Image (spheres, rainbow, N blue to C red):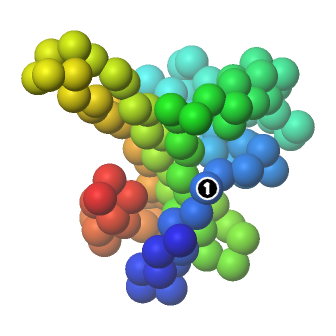
Amino acid sequence: MTEYQGYEIREATREDLAAVIAMLADDALGATRETLGEPPADCYITAFEALDADPRNEFFNLDTGGAVNGCLQLTDIPGLSRRGMERGQIESLRVLRALQGKGFGRKLFE
């Protein structure tokens, strides 16, 4: 875990799903493809469980006092190129609008 200006970067839990989905839906593209609801739709629960069970996938949240303020999915991908070098794919990097422009997305990325 990393402390950053009163915020903590931690592994996401299933209980974080509704907040994460809300962030994913909070842009022009996400608004048309995500489904908000409490509890989250089964498709999100199934996807999170698959991510959580896969050692090559990690999902992190930016948290303060139990509130999810940002998120990031990181997937390790094996490859043959560059003598079998693994690489990382970053997905779902989001920060609440109120916190955008303050360096939190960069900290999640780092």
Q: Residue at x 86, y 39 (%)?
A: 38
Q: How many marks?
A: 1
Residue 14 against residue 28 in the figure, above or below: below
Identify the amino acid type marked 1. Answer: Glu
Residue under circle 1?
Answer: 11
Q: Nearer the viewer, residue 27 or 68?
A: 68
Horizontal and vertical percent position of residue 33: 57, 18
Residue 69 against residue 90 in the figure, above or below: below
Residue at far left of view: 82
Residue 41 against residue 74 in the figure, above or below: above
Q: Is residue 66 left or right of residue 64?
A: right
Q: Residue at x 77, y 22 (%)?
A: 46
Q: Residue at x 73, y 50 (%)?
A: 13
Q: Secondary structure at mark 1?
A: strand
Residue at far top of view: 80
Residue 35 in view: no
Residue 84 against residue 14 in the figure, above or below: above
Residue at far bottom of view: 6
Horizontal and vertical percent position of residue 64: 61, 75
Q: Is residue 41 left or right of residue 29?
A: right
* Quadrant location of the C terminus in the rendered image: bottom left
Q: Residue at x 46, y 46 (%)?
A: 72
Q: Is residue 106 left or right of residue 72?
A: left
Q: Nearer the viewer, residue 25 or 60?
A: 60
Q: Place residue 35 in its image quadrant.
A: top right
